[in-house]
Image (cartoon, rainbow, N blue to C red):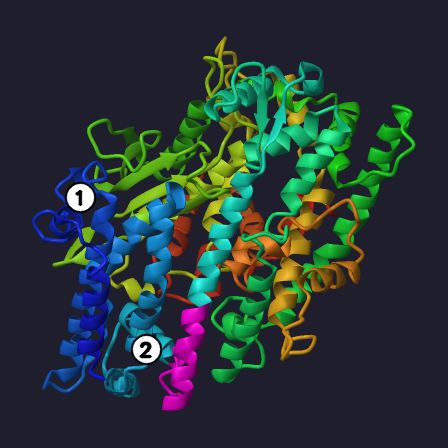
Amino acid sequence: MNKKIMIAGLILALAGSCTSTKKEAAGTDSANPLLTEFSAPFGVPPFDKIKMEHYKPAMMKGLEDGEAEIKAIVEQAAAPDFENTIVALDRSGELLSQTRAVFSAQNSANTNDEMEALSREMAPLMSQYRDNISMNAKLFARVKAVYDAREGLGLDREKAKLLEETYKSFVRGGANLNAEDQAKLRELNRQLSLLQLTFGQNMLKETNAFRLVIDNADDLAGLSEGQIANAAEAALDANLGEGKWLFTLHNPSIMPFLQNSDRRELREKIFKGYIMRGNNGNEQDNKEIVRQLVTLRLEKAKLLGYDDYASFVLSERMAKTADNVYALLDKLWEPALKVTALELADIDAEIAKEGGSFKAEGWDWRYYAEKARKARFDMDENLIRPYLKLENVRDGAFYVANRLYGITFTQLSDIPLPHPEAQAFECKDEDGTHLGVLYMDFFPRASKRGGAWCGGYRGQAYKDGKRVAPVVTIVCNFTPPSAGEPALLSLDEAETLFHEFGHGLHGLFGDVHYEGVSNVPRDFVELPSQIMEHWVLQPEVLKVYAKHYQTGEVMPAELVEKLDRSSKYGQGFATTEYLAASYLDMDYHILNEIPGNKEKGNFEVPAFEASTLGKRHLPSQIPPRYRSTYFNHTMGGGYTAGYYSYIWSEVLDADGFEAFKETGDIFNREVAARFRKYVLTPGGIDDAMEMYKNFRGKEPGTDPLLKNRGLK
């Protein structure tokens, strides 16, 4: 069937479901703000005008336009060259990309049932659209013709990289497969896109479904006034009434509860609710989805000529092979286990102090580890929060960026916001040039997925020879304000803000001419974010932002010293839970056959997880940071065979921060300029390790990482 007709048929079929006059009107170019040029300040999306009924017509029009653009490339009479084929392909699908960027960002940060239904409806169409490009034989022939002639084209390194990446994307997308195998790949891609989407939607529903409601004030023992006030407000927001306190599985609620609640039976209840997400035998159970994802990914990898899915993924990453990934994980695992054993001994000692005769369990670790921290360092995290007012921490991150790069952030008031709680800032370069817009959205809500991330409503690009500035968004789930007080962060939340801000700088500083070279490998992408965390506890920085929210007093030197001495305590737990999840991700994706009876589909996910963690002697009190059924990093598709990337990048960021320390100035502008030039600006034009060596002058070593984590 003609591809143009096929897409048009899909458009008509889907448009048939929009029966109301209002929705039909929303699809017209003049009535749909997604189908007209954005006229809001700095060209940001007109969030105040975009309605649910606008998304689908805009995406369908984007599909139609994109298909027409591909058809024009294929059917042109001119012989294939870099401009009329490679650049034209890179520029195609602009409307679809813009609409999808807005929809996807909003679907993650402020979803609803309609958005989730539309995302499920569109997923197979998007998969088909991508496959129609990568498996278009005539289009690939033109791309291959340019690629084969590459040596004589005189391309600069950015253009040469775009050509290389374009050609590889076709090969990895199945262009060299026969018709029968291409049909198989299409079906695999369709199923995978739906499964990954469903996994994430199930996880959000499971997270929102659990509620620990306390109606006896005695059961609040151990919790701080702020935690109690937040829980009371959460109960009121949930219409539970006065005299009740609500705790949920969102991190700002559950983690302080596990760390501070004196009620062991309640800690157990909320802990089990957390680790059993997606594993409750209900409609949101993810075990079968995990089994299917692992099975279908392996089938896809073999279809494309790889032994396993990890090999398919890693061939495009810095790590290159699974052996290299395991070598790094193994190097850290034994030292982490040794430190964990020492921490467990401290926990057992704290239990004994209280006269307890029970064995420590998972719901005891954070509680007794905090007691051990207090005993060892006279350090109470609740003493830190008053000095970590959210706005001050945010401004501290801005201060660091200004000292390093000379850039400034100015809050914008007259600009559409993606959510009423969001904030907007204009970023300007040192010479006053507009670099981009940064949105920040800090607090949890039922419509927002968990965790923290940095995304974008528009990527940096060039149009008509002029730089198009990016629109970046940072989304978090921090402890919200309560009882008339400001939002006071934990140290972990402060580090998260700096981390995501580092991603934001990467997006704002980007300066490439082609979308096809804008991205860096997954195991390099955490370098810009993680290196920013090194400034959080630097005394020079703390003096600027760590001020008591009531008195304005700078955090006392005594407290700073305690913070410094205690900062490495608990790294056994933190490293082990992270590495356990990294092993789990890799172990799923190095499988070259699925265990169990394939016909009966009895690959048991819980048994596999227990086996892969048990053989490494993971302490029973420490679950992996993400268990299989709520491991959205890997099962959702973003970090598949790639969760190791955080620790891989940590080798880079720990070594990279040494470049500043070696000068005696953590704000050394010369070092910062090199980091901006070679890491933050060029996208993926160069090989990732070459980018790092251009900045650092050498390959990184692991000693700084081991020292930072207290493992050496």
- Say if the magenta span includes residue 189: yes
Q: 342 above or below 223? A: below
**SS at mark 1?**
helix
Q: Position of residue 527 (x, y in %)?
A: 49, 51
In the displayed structure image, the side of residue 668 where residue 243 appears, left or right: right
The first of marks 1 and 2 along the sequence is: 1
Q: Residues within 10 Å of mark 1 (few under 14, many from 20)?
A: some
Can you tell which quarter of the image residue 520 is in? bottom left
Residue bounds of the magenta highlight: 171-191
**Marks 1/2: CA–CA distance:** 31 Å
Type of amino acid under label 2: Ser
Which residue matches tag 1? 43
Q: 134 above or below 414? A: below
| Secondary structure character of the magenta stretch overall | helix
Which residue matches tag 2? 134
In the displayed structure image, the side of residue 571 where residue 189 appears, left or right: left
- Say if the magenta span includes residue 223: no
Q: Position of residue 365 (x, y in %)?
A: 75, 37
Type of amino acid under label 1: Gly
Q: Residues within 10 Å of mark 2 (few under 14, many from 20)?
A: many
Q: 476 above or below 580? A: above
